[in-house]
Image (cartoon, rainbow, N blue to C red):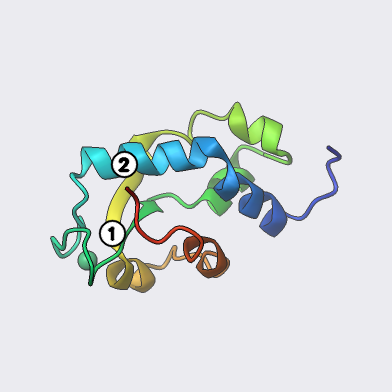
């Protein structure tokens, strides 16, 4: 893997990692699958999502991450204390809502 991928592409790759799925799972479990903003629970009408309180984009800049390998070695990205469960509508209202998130979230809507 070379270091010439764009930050957007890098973030996209991070979101596809098994580690990312695991991070989301840990955040959901800790929050009992409940939106931390409005209290909605995961269900047919509400889809919950895991939000990075400090965005991955900020963390990537702060720690100078340029590859998936360095991302994997950065504990801040995988710290569940930097995560919170939000339902889709609350998540969309956050400033940190990533513009490139939509294509990814559609792939796996409800976490089982
Ligand atoms: Zn909500």
Residue 34: image location, x then y, percent: 18, 53
Left or right: 10 in relation to 53: right
Q: Quadrant of residue 86?
A: bottom left
Q: Which residue is mark 1?
A: 86
Q: Quadrant of residue 40?
A: bottom left
Give the Cα separation between the discs numbered 2 and 1: 10 Å
Mark 2 residue crowding within 10 angstroms, few (<14) / some (14–19) / many (20+) = many
**Ligand 1 sits in quadrant:** bottom left
Q: Quadrant of residue 103?
A: bottom right
Residue 83: image location, x then y, percent: 35, 45
Disc 2 to disc 1: CB gap under 8 Å = no
Give me the residue at 50% from left, 28% from top: 75
Q: Which residue is mark 2?
A: 27
In what element is the residue under mark 2? helix
Seen from the viewer's position, the closer of residues 13 and 79 is 13
Mark found first going from the N terminus, 2 or 1 = 2
Ligand 1 under 8 Å from disc 1 Cβ: yes
Image height of 81 relative to 87, above or below:
above
Q: Residue furthest left?
A: 39
């Amino acid at each position: 893997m070379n270091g010439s991928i764009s930050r957007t592409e890098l973030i996209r790759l991070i979101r596809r990692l098994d580690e990312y799925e695991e991070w989301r799972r840990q955040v959901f479990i800790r929050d009992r699958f409940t939106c931390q903003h409005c209290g909605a629970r995961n269900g047919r009408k509400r889809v919950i999502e895991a939000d990075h309180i400090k965005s991955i984009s900020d963390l990537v800049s702060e720690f100078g991450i340029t590859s998936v390998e360095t991302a994997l070695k950065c504990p801040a990205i995988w710290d569940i204390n930097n995560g919170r469960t939000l339902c889709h509508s609350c998540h969309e209202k956050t400033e940190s809502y990533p513009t490139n998130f939509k294509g990814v979230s559609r792939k796996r809507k409800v976490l089982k």
